[in-house]
Image: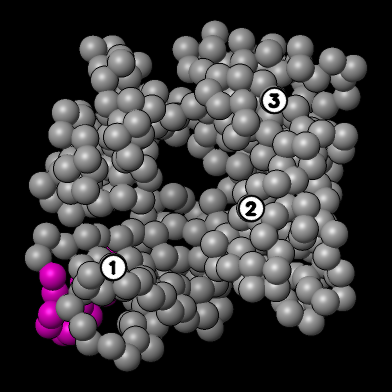
Amino acid sequence: MLHVDLDQFIAAVEVLRHPGLAGRPVIVGGDGDPAKRGVVSTASYEARAYGVHSGQPLRTAARLCPGAVFLPVDREAYEAVSAQVMAALRESGAVVEVLGWDEAFLGISDDDPEAFARGLQQRVRVATRLDSTVGIGRNKLQAKLATGFGKPAGVFRLTDENWFWVLGDRPTDALWGIGAKTARRLTGLGLRTVRELAAADPGTLAREFGPATGPWLVMLAQGRGSREVDDTPYQARSHGREVTFQEDIADWPEVTREVDRLAGLVAGELATDGPADADRTPVRIVVKVRYVPFITETHGQPLTQPTVDPAAIRAAALTALGKFTSRRPVRLLGVRAEFRRPR
């Protein structure tokens, strides 16, 4: 199993478009104006050295890295380059499961996976002039984690034999699938490292986390994971729009009007995609509200039946909005249409 991850993908695409930015700290996010509200989508390695990271407010990034070049997000450009990357990966003959713009799992049968991985890197470089990192493992978990050890532009392999040598003494949230909250709960049980979690009693964790999640956490720590690669064409599972306001909205009727507007935009964009197929028809509408300062809540509303009807989408969005009880000032709103899971 291989995991291919493009290095600093969005920033790297922008450097290709603007060669004069090579070697300079580049930050992509929002409309490219750090004086306005918005968050970092990605940062070049030069910017990351200053502490800039994805999801960070643009204003904070500008303070940390005052010499950075800020650029607006250009989805169409990134999608076009991503298509070239995935085409190059498929030309290798491997089974390719696309995870997003800049990463994919590949299933291969090869006696020298490191050489195959270096061949993939060369294919991507020739097609796009972009660097990538390849992680190799017996399963998806190992391959995904191996990529992190290969950054940037390297190849790294995790195996059953070196699993604990590489990861055993690391904290549990080093594992793909374990976040900070779960790691804190595990620490409360005396399980601080991957090695300790791997040796834990699945039954004990089942009582703490549930009959499925508890044993699954132990399996993660033991380096066990899925070995299946699904080459079904990638489809987004939702479509949405959101807006960050330059001035906080304290008037709830204005919030309501803005949600209605966003829902209308989402419905209109779905309509322009052409006739809806079953897997691209919304079944649920989700509204996202970020209060001042940075408290985010979401509520959803199922549609009575799958539909792209604008009136139904707007009505569901307003129903979801009605589930919010706080009336604190709002700095961001979003509306997302979720599709049925691909069969």
Location of residue 163 (image quadrant) = top right
Q: CA distance from mark 3 to mark 2?
A: 20 Å
What's the residue at 55%, 41% (across, down)?
100
What's the residue at 23%, 70% (across, down)?
293
Q: Which label is found at residue 11? A: none
What's the residue at 81%, 47% (across, down)?
223
Q: Nearer the viewer, mark 3 or mark 2?
A: 2
Q: CA distance from mark 1 to mark 2?
A: 27 Å
Residue identified by numbered label 1: 294
Q: Nearer the viewer, mark 1 or mark 2?
A: 2
Q: Which residues are magenta?
A: 248-262
- Name the residue type under label 2: Pro
Q: Residue 329: x and y, percent?
A: 17, 78
- Name the residue type under label 1: Phe
The answer to whether residue 261 is seen in the rendering is: no
Location of residue 245 (image quadrant) = bottom left
Q: Is residue 261 magenta?
A: yes
SS of the residue at dot 2? loop
Q: Quadrant of the N terminus?
A: top right
What's the residue at 32%, 72% (across, down)?
295
User: Which of the two labelled residues, at mark 3 and mark 1, occupies the earlier sequence position?
Assistant: 3
Q: Residue 234: x and y, percent?
A: 61, 43
Name the magenta segment's main secondary structure.
Answer: helix
Residue identified by numbered label 2: 171
